[in-house]
Amino acid sequence: MITWAKRQFVQYREQISYLFFGGLATLLNLVLAVVFRWMGFSTFWNTLLDNLVCILFAYLTNRTWVFCSQVKGWKAVQEFAAFVGCRLGTLVLDVALMWLGVDLLGQLVAESWQDGWFVLVKVVTQVLVIAGNYLFSKWIIFRR
């Protein structure tokens, strides 16, 4: 049983690591979003700021533990620029979906449900963002 589990982990290490660190980044994103909402930030600024923090967190974890990048010097700068560039694409997706879900459709939700609706929309957008980020990371940024 342990040998089988070990083989599976070795075979799917990248995907398992991405899910683990992606889960941490998503949790960080959700916590920051709730804190920024509590602080009174608009949906736009909330989403922008929580994404910027999470982009830095995700780059460090993806580079080090998920894709095990060893590039240095100018190649590392290019890798970081590609990472940020791709993440800015999913940031635009996140901002647009949050605007649509919270600011536009959220007007149809009862006042007592606004905070729950905000979190629900944020969770749904994060699923789409995670999928996009993995594809960008796998095929563009950290390709071998």
Image: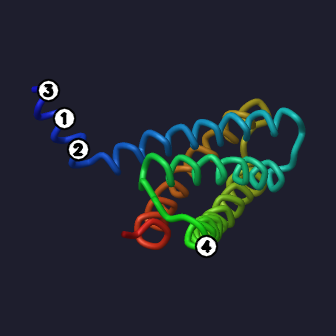
Residue 130 position in % (x across, y down): 50, 54
State the separation of the CA atoms marked 1 and 2. 6 Å
Looking at the rendered structure, the kind of residue marked 1 is Lys
The residue shown at (68%, 66%) is 92
The residue shown at (50%, 45%) is 22
Query: Helix, strand or loop at disc 1?
Result: helix
Q: Are marks 3 and 1 in contact (CB under 8 Å)?
A: yes
Check disc 2: other Cα within 10 Å, few if <14, some if 14-19, many if 20+: few
Check disc 3: other Cα within 10 Å, few if <14, some if 14-19, many if 20+: few
Query: Helix, strand or loop at disc 2?
Result: helix
Residue marked by disc 3: 2
The residue shown at (59%, 36%) is 27
Q: Earlier in the sequence, mark 2 or mark 4?
A: 2
Q: Are marks 1 and 2 in contact (CB under 8 Å)?
A: yes
Residue marked by disc 4: 74
Looking at the rendered structure, the kind of residue marked 2 is Val
State the separation of the CA atoms marked 3 and 4. 42 Å
Tell me the quadrant of the picture where the N terminus can be found: top left
Q: Earlier in the sequence, mark 3 or mark 4?
A: 3
Residue marked by disc 2: 10
Q: Nearer the viewer, residue 131 or 1?
A: 1
Residue 104 position in % (x across, y down): 76, 57
Q: Earlier in the sequence, mark 4 or mark 1?
A: 1
Q: Are marks 2 and 4 in contact (CB under 8 Å)?
A: no
Residue marked by disc 1: 6
Residue 76 position in % (x across, y down): 58, 66
